[in-house]
Amino acid sequence: MNMYTTAHDKSFPIKTTRITYKYKKHSPWTTKGLIKSAVTRSQLHLKKMKDPTNANIEQYTTFTRIYKKLHRLAKKTFYEEQLENAKHNIKETWTILRKAMNKTNNTIPLPEFFNLYNIKLSDKQEIVMNSMVSLLK
């Protein structure tokens, strides 16, 4: 078995790669101009970190401020257009609103049983009664 794993590891080494902006998954409101601005902002950040002069810091903060403003405006415009297109469909409107608020319907189910003082409780009434008793102690 050891021979197979060494042959596998030698034939298929683990490689780490960096995902560039070109292949990264973007938000639906992100335009090519915003992607280009993000690359420029990253370059300005590197320049600021390597040579932290007042001019470089000011240039980075000014560019970042403008970039954030444009990013928020693009997001706002995207969702306004989406809501305008779905104004007569209430179900789609609520779906868009949930996406805008980053809300999901993924609820974690309750466990089927609880362990209380090393006693396995599965009946709902038992759980309630025993938890009330443990709170009163």
Image (cartoon, rainbow, N blue to C red):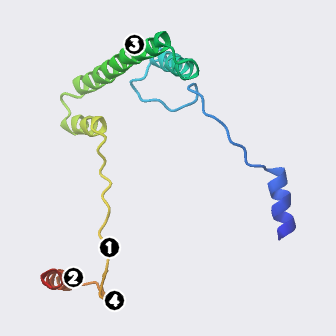
Q: Mark 4 or mark 3, which is nearer the start of the sequence?
A: 3
User: In which quarter of the view is residue 17 placed?
Assistant: top right
User: What amino acid is found at the position of numbered circle 2 in the picture?
Assistant: Ile
Mark 3 sits on what residue?
Answer: 62
Front residue of 134/113: it is 134
On screen, residue 32 versus residue 113, left or right, reads right
Q: Are marks 3 and 4 in contact (CB under 8 Å)?
A: no
Front tag of 3 and 2: 3
Q: Disc number at residue 111?
A: 1
Badge 1 marks a residue whose secondary structure is: loop
On screen, residue 2 versus residue 119, left or right, reads right
Q: Mark 2 or mark 3, which is nearer the start of the sequence?
A: 3
On screen, residue 63 versus residue 115, left or right, reads right
Q: Are marks 4 and 2 in contact (CB under 8 Å)?
A: no
Q: Disc number at residue 73?
A: none
Q: Is residue 26 above or below residue 112?
A: above
Graded by Cα atoms within 10 Å as few (under 14), some (14 to 19) or many (20 or more), the crowding at tag 3 reads few
- How far apart, in angstroms, are the residues tagged by discs 3 and 2? 58 Å
- How far apart, in angstroms, are the residues tagged by discs 1 and 2? 11 Å
- How far apart, in angstroms, are the residues tagged by discs 4 and 1? 16 Å
